[in-house]
């Protein structure tokens, strides 16, 4: 999930401090991590994301292991990262549509997740 967060944050070619801080905060809340642990997890995810040729490997692992209700929360977390810098762009929106689909989350629930984010 952390690698997906990094990938969505980088999708607009601007990996901002606000997005990094949001990733750390979301990881900290979701996994009950200290700030240092969350930052370390994000840094590991950055390396993993940089080496991964595609997004499917990440979404497949989540879809196979995580129940739908929790995948909804994954989509919500991804939307939190997208919205962290205060701007949405076409690349982020397109990748979010793809990610939600690959995670098996329908458009209506993705929109609801965005509103909750």
Image (cartoon, helix red, strand yellow):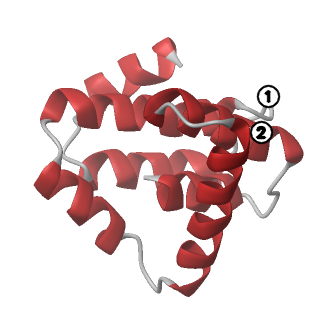
Q: Is residue 88 visible?
A: no
> Which residue occupies the foreground of this view, 114 or 94?
114
Q: Is residue 20 above or below residue 70?
A: below
Residue 29: give its label.
none
Q: In the picture, residue 45 is in which quadrant?
A: bottom right
> Which residue occupies the foreground of this view, 68 or 89?
68
Q: Is residue 28 above or below residue 17?
A: above
**Residue 41, percent from left and from top:** 59, 57
Q: In the picture, residue 58 is in which quadrant?
A: bottom left
Report the residue at 71% width, 38% height from top: 35
Locate residue 6 relative to residue 18 in the image: left or right. Answer: left
Instruction: Report if the CB atoms under discs 1 and 2 are less than 8 Å apart.
Output: no
Label 2, on which residue?
21
Residue 86: give its label.
1
Q: Is residue 25 above or below residue 57?
A: above
Categorize mark 1 by other alpha carbons within 10 Å: few (<14), some (14-19), many (20+).
few
Quadrant (top left/top right/bottom left/bottom right) for the C terminus: top right
Report the residue at 60% width, 49% height from top: 92
Q: First in sequence, mark 1 or 2: give its number.
A: 2
Report the residue at 53% width, 76% height from top: 48
Q: Is residue 112 visible?
A: yes
């Amino acid at each position: 999930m952390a690698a997906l967060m990094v990938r969505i944050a980088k999708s607009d070619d601007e990996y901002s401090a606000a997005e990094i801080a949001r990733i750390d905060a979301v990881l900290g809340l979701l996994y009950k991590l200290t700030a240092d642990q969350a930052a370390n997890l994000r840094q590991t995810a950055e390396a993993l994301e940089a080496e991964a040729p595609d997004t499917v490997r990440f979404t497949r692992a989540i879809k196979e292991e995580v129940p739908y209700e929790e995948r909804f929360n994954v989509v919500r977390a991804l939307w939190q990262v997208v919205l962290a810098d205060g701007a949405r762009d076409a690349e982020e929106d397109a990748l979010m549509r793809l990610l939600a689909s690959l995670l098996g989350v329908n458009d209506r629930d993705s929109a609801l997740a965005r509103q909750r984010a």
